[in-house]
Image: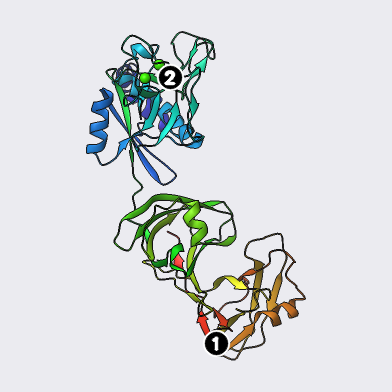
Amino acid sequence: MIKASLTSLRPISLVFLIFLLPSPSMGQTRNLETEYNFKRYELVLSNVSWEQARSAAQAAGGDLLVISSEGENTHIADWLQTQLSFIRGATSGVSDGGGAIYVWLGASDAGQEGTWTWVNDVQFYSGDGQTGSPISGRYNNWGSGPLGSEPDNFGSGGQDYAAMGLEAWPTGRAAGQGIGESGEWNDISGNSTTVYVIEYPRDTANDVVMAPIFAASSGIQSYLRFINPTDTPGEVAIQFSDASGNILREICRVGVKPNYAGQLGMDSLTEACQLAESDAATLSISYTSDFIGYMQHVVWNPTGGSLTNFSVCSKAAESRNYLTNVHSSKITTYPSRISITNTSDVAKSFKLDFTDSQDQSLSVGTWESPVLAAKAHGLYKIPDIETDLGYSPPESGGFHYTVQFDASSTGGILGHFVDNLDAGVITEFTARCASQ
Ligand SMILES: [Ca+2]
Ligand SMILES: [Ca+2]
């Protein structure tokens, strides 16, 4: 049946084959967009000057491509290789770039010869290829080989605009025998024409928004907890704004290990995320993660000695049966209690898996609760559970547990409460926010 169909279609297939052969798209799938580290990139197949490319990129709501890490460069270069046949269809080689195919980068030294600045005003390289050096250790990937080093400001008119080569230059040289290789950068004339990539700011439309968070300068200590219950390393991307909505940091990435629930104080986050100066006492954050997990905001008020859960956010997490950062007996002033409520119609006991929230190498154990009548509940102190388990937290670390029902325990819900002994209050710590 299939054979018959193929035979009958053969004349049509040949027509298509003849039509397809000269097409530049043979073998590649058109894919003009990619994402990397929460940002979106769009390849525009127009053969234009640097200024024309910049204007069009800004008009589209983004800007020309800024590359700040080897990972980003590799991702973009690999993606553009998959689009090379389409790019060749849109532009020819750049004559003052050794005849190779390029894509514009959002970098220039037109303002001051030898001072290379990205379109986001970050200066990243000083000097020319022979004697130049990165500014503040910033990433660069200028081409360099037996025939020369970029940026070389070549020619009488000079070269003040950066582009990424998509093949080695000068063309016709064997790999490693010219100046630059595919994925490396060259300075070329802004009047040269080639295609460009628009880099869009992170789309925060679907972010989780959490506020208020106390700024490090407020005297009240906010801690953000990053909870990754998956088996793969993840990242959270955070935008910080002050109370008036002024953006203090566009994007700060925080790595989170697998099966991990860690916390960072706002003092550490302010430094790690290089937050812009602000008089704001409280902040908002807008965030997303590349894993399905949780965020929690807890506040320690040193004046009153209270530790409270401030997880007010636009997307609450749904599962209640997963507790993290439950205090071990090492946190003596703020002992944790966990509650179990038997929501089923039969009396039963529940088994809870205890793991260390930060150190997976520690083997804590599975604890079995007393039998709870139908609809009954119990409150259990962590030191008592540690005794039942025969477990003692180690000298170093061992402050927090992650607690879940084991697979056989159904029909119950878990809660987490902290006794603030100095303040004489009990606070609820179960609530948390979704991580995306
Ligand atoms: Ca120059
Ligand atoms: Ca050059």
Which quadrant of the render holds ligand 2? top left
In this rendering, position of residue 236 left or right of residue 370: left
At horizontal 50% and vertical 60% (from top left) the residue drawn is 267
Image location (x, y in percent) of residue 115: 39, 26
Image location (x, y in percent) of residue 89: 31, 20
Q: Quadrant of the C terminus?
A: bottom left
For disc 1, the neighbor class at 10 Å (few under 14, some 14 to 19, many from 20) is few
At horizontal 33% and vertical 50% (from top left) the residue drawn is 203
Image location (x, y in percent) of residue 144: 51, 17
Which of the two residues, 122 or 58, is positioned nearer the viewer here?
A: 122
Quadrant of res 395: bottom right
Quadrant of res 117: top left
| First reached walking from the N terminus: tag 1 or tag 2 | 2
Mark 1–mark 2 CB contact (< 8 Å)? no
Instruction: Indicate the secondary structure of the residue bearing disc 2.
Output: loop
Instruction: Indicate the secondary structure of the residue bearing disc 1.
Output: loop
Inspect the image, locate mark 2, and give the three-letter code of the amino acid beneath it.
Pro
Is ligand 2 less than 8 Å from the beta carbon at label 2? yes
At horizontal 50% and vertical 77% (from top left) the residue drawn is 303
Q: Which residue is mark 1?
A: 424
| Distance from the alpha carbon under mark 1 to that under mark 2 | 66 Å
At horizontal 35% and vertical 58% (from top left) the residue drawn is 241
For disc 2, the neighbor class at 10 Å (few under 14, some 14 to 19, many from 20) is many
Q: Which residue is mark 2?
A: 151
In this rendering, position of residue 357 left or right of residue 145: right
Inspect the image, locate mark 1, and give the three-letter code of the amino acid beneath it.
Gly
Asked if residue 61 can be seen in this view, the reply is: yes
